[in-house]
Amino acid sequence: MFRRPRTGSTLCPSCGKLVGVNDEVCYNCGRKRPGMWGLTAVLRNLGKDLGFVETVIVGTAFLYVAMLVVDPAGIRMGGLFSIGAPSTQSLLRFGAAGAFPVFGLGRWWTLLSAGWLHAGLLHIGFNLYWIRMLAPETAELYGAGRMVIVYTVSSIAGFSLSSIVGAFLPFLGGGGLTVGASAPILGLLGALVYYGRRVGSSTIGRQA
């Protein structure tokens, strides 16, 4: 299934026309090395998102379970949105962002790690559902590489903003400790809306 072909033809990832796996340039669109030495067929088997969604789902689920296992006594069950919530100590240990971790402890790396952590069963369930819905569609329109960039930059920007608000504008509420994939999800959503407006497609905009 994942065997790399060394001869024959494949589809150019830019224009979708047939090219040789060893061609130096696509004669239709001019893309250099369109066959990627046979790797385009291998990557296509991973799906439109090149396996990114599965990586996020598996990684996020693993980290959620790990947070519960590390501190089982601290698992919270009160309230609909707190069912199965890891303890605050677990969230901090695994890389939650927010005013305290970022500015109090100097953990700037949490701006990237916090998007992989979740604070309850409903929280992780809803977010993983929307990632599965939005990420492949974004990859279809922008390409898998750009989709991952949008996802990552949106996550960092979102947690940076929430941490700054928590540290310097505490009267707005929240921001002390933040986790979840809401920021990258909104980034994917914004990318879809922008694409619809850029190409004049009202259908994409309405769906988003």
Image (tube, rainbow, N blue to C red):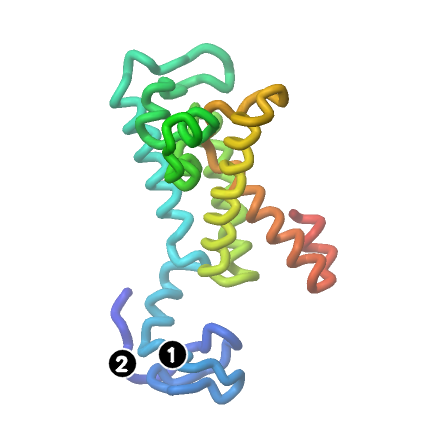
Q: Quick one: label 1 or label 2, which is nearer the N terminus?
A: 2
Which residue is the site of mark 2? 6
Amino acid tagged 2:
Arg
Q: Is residue 177 left or right of residue 43?
A: right
Q: Spatial distance from mark 1 to mark 2, Cα to Cα?
A: 10 Å
Q: Nearer the viewer, residue 14 or 109?
A: 109
| Residue 202 picture location, percent across and down | 74, 56
| Residue 116 picture location, percent across and down | 40, 37
Q: Nearer the viewer, residue 53 or 18?
A: 53
Which residue is found at the position 50% from the left and 63% from the top? 143
Which residue is found at the position 33% from the left and 72% from the top? 39
Tell me the crowding category of disc 2: few under 14, some 14 to 19, or many 20 or more residues within 10 angstroms, Cα based. Answer: few
Tell me the crowding category of disc 1: few under 14, some 14 to 19, or many 20 or more residues within 10 angstroms, Cα based. Answer: many
Question: Furthest residue to the bottom?
Answer: 27
Which residue is found at the position 36% from the left and 71% from the top? 41
Amino acid tagged 1:
Gly
| Residue 168 picture location, percent across and down | 56, 27
Is 126 located above or below residue 87 in the figure?
Answer: below
Is 48 located above or below residue 185 in the figure?
Answer: below
Q: Is residue 197 left or right of residue 8?
A: right
Is 164 located above or below residue 136 in the figure?
Answer: above
SS state under label 2: loop
Q: Is residue 108 left or right of residue 73?
A: right
Please state which of the two labelled residues, at mark 1 or mark 2, is closer to the viewer. 1
Which residue is the site of mark 1? 35
Is 142 located above or below residue 36 in the figure?
Answer: above
Are dots 1 and 2 in contact, CB under 8 Å? no
